[in-house]
Image: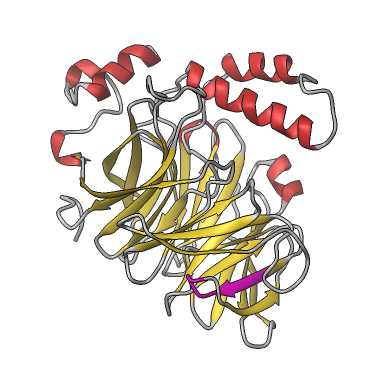
Amino acid sequence: MLSGRVRAACYSLLVFAGACGPGDAGDEALFTPELIHTTAVPLGDNPSLALLADERTACVIDSYEVRVRCVDAEGSVVGVFGREGEGPGEFGDPAYLARGEAGTVGVVDSDLGRFTVFEPSGVYVSAVVLPSVFQPGPSFGAAVSGVSLDYMEMLRGDGSGSLMTRYEVDLASGAVVRQEGSPHGPWGVECGQVIHGIPDRREGWGFVACEGHLIFVGDTGDATVLRAPMYVPELPNERDVARLEETLRRFNRERGFPISQGVEEQVDDYRATPKNYHLSTGQQLFDDANRYWIATQRDQHEWSWLDVYENAEYVGSVRVRDRLQAFDLLGSTLVVLVDRQVGPDDADGIPDRALDWYDIADLPFRR
């Protein structure tokens, strides 16, 4: 097996041939889309992102100010809304964003357990109470759909029970109009742990598991288990390590603990452990054609990678610049929230954050 450094070199040089070893793809499976716009956004530690219905407006969570910021592709601010509190339009902990079919944006507040709908300008529309630990789908209409994770089932990890519960909540009444557990195995994943799942657009599901495994369950209940062909165990680089250390120190500071409490031990363990295939549990989606897109932890230095699957088969990868944190798709537009590389002009040593818009109309494996 190739080292992570050699593997990264193969990607950077776009050498998708026999020299790069198992898991490589041909040139037809790699797509670097055209960057059409970029917009700076404030720093934050929440990667949630919503692309709205007009394909030219995107919203991010400004976690340090406990608010949401919406900008257009040219960089103009469309709206900034929310503040810390418990009243209408206020947030305890804004955790996820979703785009409304009518150009609205929905905000899941994990502390207050509610879903609040706004116009992109910040005008308050409505709010409903949510099931606990709720993660929404990328879009919503008259109802918001999402999933909740069963932590005990995740810790058990063998897939023998329903890991997720799928909900639909009517936005007018707040009533739960659908509630059902996800399909379950056991799936026969060698390493054992199933981590998270999302429903597709045809009553099926996609799950991520340990060591790069994916599980696709069709609407008939038939399951396909595979190891992601582009996954190679790769140790964290120093940029990954620095980001974790910053997160741990901030966690301690916010809770009044000694800043360095437990940090060194956790960082040492992280440095010695191969990264997951998936970037995070919130960064996968099924597009309008029911293709599964997953943000990966591959490289993430000069480039980041989204892998795409169709009918439970890998079909290609999309390469975007800088360190991907979140993404969304709408029509032929891909929008990506990224951390830039630290450059000579960054006196504070902190990477800038930006939204990049890409045109994927010519995606070679798009039908």
Residue found 66% across the figure and 49% down from its top: 160
Residue 117 included in the magenta stretch of the image:
yes
Q: For the N terminus, which image quadrant?
A: top left
Q: Position of residue 12 (x, y in %)?
A: 25, 23
Q: Quarter-wise, where is residue 222 in the image?
A: bottom left
Q: Position of residue 210 (x, y in %)?
A: 55, 34
Q: For the C terminus, which image quadrant?
A: bottom left
Residue found 29% across the figure and 23% down from its top: 22
Q: Position of residue 202 (x, y in %)?
A: 42, 69
Q: Position of residue 5 (x, y in %)?
A: 36, 13
Q: Indicate how the structure is coloured in the image.
A: secondary structure
Residue found 77% across the figure and 62% down from its top: 85
Instruction: Return the residue nearer the eye: 30 or 184.
Output: 30
Residue found 54% across the figure and 61% down from its top: 97
Q: Measured along the vertical axis of the image, is residue 228 above or below residue 138?
A: above
Q: Measured along the vertical axis of the image, is residue 173 above or below residue 278?
A: below
Instruction: Return the residue nearer the eye: 231 or 275.
Output: 275
In the image, the segment drawn in magenta is 115-121
Q: Is residue 146 visible?
A: yes
Q: Measured along the vertical axis of the image, is residue 55 above or below residue 213?
A: below
Of all residues shown, which one is farthest toward the bottom? Answer: 173
